[in-house]
Image (tube, rainbow, N blue to C red):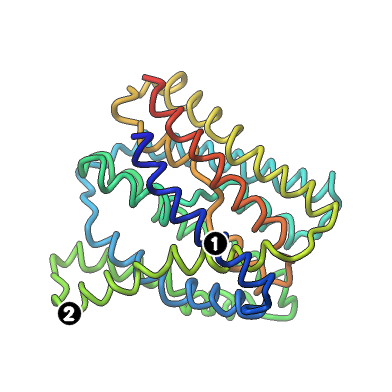
Amino acid sequence: MIQILINSFMPVALLILFGYISAKKTIFKYEDALSIIKYIGFIAVPALTLKMTVSISFSNINWLLISSYIISELAIYFTAILISKYFFNLKWNESILIGMASSFANHLLFIYPIALNEYGPSMIDPIIAIIGFDVIFLVINLIILDFIKFKNLKFKNIIFKQLSNLPLLALITGLLIIFLDLSLPLSIQRALEFISGSAAPCALFAAGIILSQKIEKTELKVSNLIIGFKIFLHPIIAILIIWNFNGIEFSISETTIMVASAPVGLMALIFSTQYDVNPNAITRALLITTLLSVISIPLVSTLS
């Protein structure tokens, strides 16, 4: 397991490094990173979401396990928001995105590929279920952020605006395909495979570009808050709830605990620029938590 994680980490490190060097050499600029992130959010992530959703088996999902994880995620989310707002005196839109960064894991582009090679469907389905919840939770966050940004926009217009949220549409489409017992044409399956494969490399390269930017002292403190919550506090809370409170065995919950120990997810980074929030602190936290997860994920996998 440790060897697999090391092999998975090397491409991650190299892509971030290439992005960083490219920006320092002025081959790519900050604006280029924003364009790459937009492609990821609007094209690659929806393709990957649809691809995974159609593969899920609802009969294999342990809903007590999923609800336990969700409670731990929400605890981290709300605590990070309150600290960002009332301790760091950030605006509400900034605080919400910090809450997202502190609680949303990189399950889509980090844990899922590892689990796909290492575990059976019964252990992968909880990861997909968590991803599905996070897509829905993301939409709720975007509605709140829209209220903050567009104060004169009517509620129905904000709700209607979410119909253009492509990850949500991909999730709904995938669920419809499952419930209607349909199958995707081979050409569509191959297209999804091809497009979704570009999500992680593009995101890591863009993160390297953004990481080359100067970071302020306040952003450094916020970044450290995200790192502490995501890598240390989230796994501890998840383990307490899943094992101690609900008594779920390690053999069933291993991949779910891995998700709690995963690095910062991309969604807060992708949407930060759309809601006028400087992404530097989130990008730094994404990089450092990715490095630390090489230790944290193997560590939780040995707790049985």
- Give the residue type at disc 2: Ser
Residue type at mark 1 is: Met
On screen, residue 133 versus residue 62, left or right, reads right
Residue 53 found in image quarter: bottom left
In which quadrant will I find the C terminus? top left
Task: Say which element carries label 1.
Answer: helix
Q: Can you give x and y, in whole percent of width and height, for residue 228 in the image? A: 66, 37
Which residue carries the number 2 mark? Answer: 187
User: Can you name the residue that lies furthest to the front here?
Assistant: 25
Above or below 287: residue 3: above
Give the crowd class for mark 2: few <14, some 14-19, many >=20 residues within 10 Å.
few
Question: Where does label 1 land, which residue?
Answer: 267
Along the line of sight, which residue is nearer the eye, 275 or 106?
106
Q: Nearer the viewer, residue 63 or 128?
A: 128
- Residue shown at 21% from the left, 78% from the top: 188
Which residue: 20% across, 41% down?
120
Residue 48 is marked as: none
Label 1 CA crowd tier, 10 Å (few <14, some 14–19, many 20+): many
